[in-house]
Amino acid sequence: MVTFLAGGTGTPKLLDGAARVFEPAETAVVANTGDDVELGGHLVCPDVDTVLFAGGGVLDHETWWGIDGDTTATHEELRRLADEVGLGTAPRYLDDAAQTAGREIARWRRFSAVGEFMEIGDRDRAVHLTRTSLLDEGKSLTEAVGVLADAFDLDVDLLPMSDDPVATLVHTEGGETLHFQEYWVARRAEPAVADVEFRGAADAEPTDAVLDALAEPVVIGPSNPVTSLGPMLALPGFERALRETPVVAVSPFVGDEVFSGPAADLMRGVGRKPSTAGVADAYPFADAFVLDDDDPTELDRHVERTDTRIADADDAERVARACERALAAVTDEPAGARPPGGGAE
């Protein structure tokens, strides 16, 4: 068994070729839910759904968000209606009373659908409607995601990090507090970051299924250490579990150059070096790292090197094999248990 920690696009890209290295039926994926939002009453789980759609063979690989070829008629009409009456299309965060009312899983991340600041495809919306309705029928988030995973015929075991609400909130130097999706999607990561809060994490718990998955060797893909892994690490007991199992992490940096996304600004905002060295400091529990061939960083832990840029499934397989070698170096498991190209069809 092996468990991947997934957030953003970094780890899903790695998973694109990991099935050639790690048996999918023996693979668990724990997905970040700190980025989730309730938009117009529907729970949207971006990091869960990227893995869901990728595993189901329908992900839009141009954007790494949503379903390939999806239409956006409902989204466009929501924006037209808002513009028609002068309401605009900026994010409309509901007031404090609404944030803690009703469905508990949506606390501190509720937005009106007026103007719909996030683009939601029509088929994509059906997933959010199904998930939210399953929650309203009494299922946990883990159970609802399991139903959707079955519907998309996933080979891996996809687990949300918690059934409790955790909201990633970005505090800006200008004094604003923005949900991560408002910061990233609506503001294009332009406000300077002063800090990042994982609201609700202290009172949330990783599920039993997640704790069972964390008892296996863990791979952290090249995801954002602050907003993809930070919400997980903020859960009580999560980091302790990582300290007790072999962990390999792939750096999302080459030295001090980040591959993509706002990781550098966010790490700087929380007082960490925006670099591979900063990632290593953020992951004291990691036993080994996979670094790019051109990364000059020297670490005091086991390092495997390869070209870590991932543009397609072949690249992902190359990086996954480096992860396999790193895991073998810090456990008793032999590397090369599966031959090149030996993944599931």
Image (tube, rainbow, N blue to C red):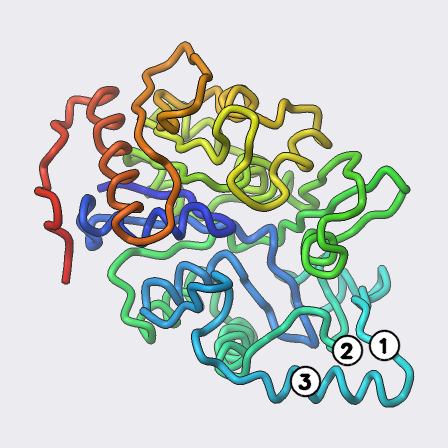
Labels in figure, total: 3
Work out whether residue 209 can be spotted.
no
Q: Which residue is painted at 35% across and 26% down in the image? A: 293
Position of the N terminus, as image quadrant, is top left
Q: Which residue is painted at 28% across and 36% down in the image? A: 216
**What's the CA distance linking mark 3 and mark 1?**
13 Å
Q: Which residue is mark 2?
A: 115
- Pointer 2 or 1: first along the chain: 1
Q: Which residue is mark 1?
A: 88
For residue 151, above or below residue 250: below
What secondary structure is found at the residue carrying circle 3?
helix
**What's the CA distance linking mark 2 and mark 1?**
6 Å
- Pointer 3 or 1: first along the chain: 3
**What's the CA distance linking mark 3 and mark 2?**
9 Å
Amino acid tagged 2: Gly
The answer to the question of whether label 2 and label 1 lie on touching residues, with beta carbons closer than 8 A, is yes
Q: Which residue is mark 3?
A: 76
Q: For the view shown, which residue lies furthest in the front direction?
A: 294
Relative placement, left or right, of 115 versus 257 is: right
